[in-house]
């Protein structure tokens, strides 16, 4: 059995401690880099910040990147990874994944290392995509209760967060793209200047049941005005998405301006 080039331990992951009379259960955890060096998944990702800049193996120093076609990156953190891939072979309990590009995940981990306050925002975006209204509400309540000296996003900053690794989309963009109507209404309630009377009765009843107070925000902070890196508002995304999102757009509730 091979060993990790970083920690020199066998390329397995222990999944439980086992009973006293049984051996601990282990599964493969072997990430083979293009240069032939092998790592545990976490051992390589622990070096994400350096790897995403150098694009070299932290063990042997070999170049890991393969050129691909792609746009240039404006973000300095992403500049070295634009138009390239790191194609690996990853063996775990699910089998063997060949030509697995780890660069997007390495880039994300490096970004979160440099911006730890963005971790809850990334979780929030996943919830918006999946339609997890309860999870979003709980996350926002946690943000309101947060204290301590660590850098954190305020509730409004969290709701308005635009992901630099995801085309600068906001949670509203993602909810519209994935046709998550309940999430769209929730975000409009929390972070838009849309008159309360415009919201459907079931939506108002739902937010009241969840105890969600509607904050007063200036028009400059209205989530509907946010644009992704293609210049699209959530209204424009709704027009492209079609279906019930286009129907919602036709009512004017996604228009980034005064409701008429």
Image (cartoon, rainbow, N blue to C red):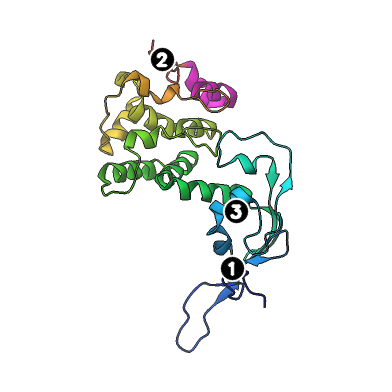
What residue is disc 3 on?
51
Who's the residue at 30% across and 24% down the image? 217
Rendering coords of residue 245 (x, y %): 51, 25
Determine whether, in the image, residue 194 is placed left or right of residue 247.
left
Foreground mark, 2 or 1, reads: 1
Main SS class of the magenta portion in the image: helix
Q: State the mark number for residue 251.
A: none
Count residues near mark 2 (Cα–Cα under 10 Å), then give few for <14, some for 14-19, many for 20+. Answer: some
Q: Return the disc, 3 or 2, that comes first in the chain's sequence.
A: 3
Name the residue at 61% across, 72% down. 11
> Does label 3 or label 1 sit earlier along the sequence?
1
**Mark 3 Cα shell of 10 Å, populated few (<14), some (14-19), many (≥20):** many
Secondary structure at badge 2 equals: loop
Say which quarter of the image contains residue 67: top right
Residue 252, position as x, y percentages in the image: 44, 16
Which residue is at 55% across, 42% downward?
77
CA distance separating discs 2 and 1: 54 Å
Across and down, in percent, residue 219 comes to 35, 19
Whether residue 131 is visible here, answered yes or no, is no
Which label number is shown at residue 257? Answer: 2
**Among all residues in the image, which is located at the extreme top?**
260
Mark closer to the chain start, 2 or 1: 1
Quarter of the image with the N terminus is bottom right
Q: Is residue 58 left or right of residue 208?
A: right
Answer few, some or many: residues within 10 Å of disc 1's Cα (few below 14, many 20 plus, some between 14 and 19). some
Quadrant (top left, top right, bottom left, bottom right) of the C terminus? top left
């Amino acid at each position: 059995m091979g060993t990790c080039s970083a920690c020199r331990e066998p390329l397995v992951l222990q999944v439980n401690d086992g009973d006293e009379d049984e051996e601990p259960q282990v599964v493969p955890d072997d990430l083979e880099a293009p240069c032939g060096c092998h790592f545990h998944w976490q051992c390589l990702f622990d070096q994400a910040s350096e790897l995403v800049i150098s694009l070299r193996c932290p063990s042997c120093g070999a170049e890991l990147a393969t050129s691909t076609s792609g746009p240039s990156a404006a973000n300095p953190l992403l500049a070295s990874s634009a138009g390239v891939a790191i194609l690996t072979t990853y063996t775990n309990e699910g089998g063997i994944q060949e030509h697995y590009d780890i660069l997007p995940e390495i880039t994300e981990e490096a970004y979160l290392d440099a911006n730890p306050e963005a971790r809850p925002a990334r979780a929030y975006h996943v919830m918006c995509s999946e339609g997890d209204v309860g999870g979003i509400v709980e996350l926002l309540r946690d943000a309101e209760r947060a204290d301590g000296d660590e850098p954190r996003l305020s509730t409004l900053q969290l709701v308005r967060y635009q992901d630099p690794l995801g085309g600068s989309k906001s949670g509203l963009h993602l909810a519209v793209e994935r046709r998550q109507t309940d999430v769209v209404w929730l975000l409009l309630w929390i972070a838009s200047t849309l008159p309360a009377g415009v919201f459907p009765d079931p939506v108002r009843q739902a937010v009241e049941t969840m105890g969600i107070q509607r904050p007063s925000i200036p028009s400059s902070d209205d989530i509907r005005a946010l644009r992704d890196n293609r210049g699209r508002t959530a209204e424009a995304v709704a027009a492209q998405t079609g279906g019930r999102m286009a129907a919602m757009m036709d009512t004017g509730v996604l228009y980034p301006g005064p409701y008429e």
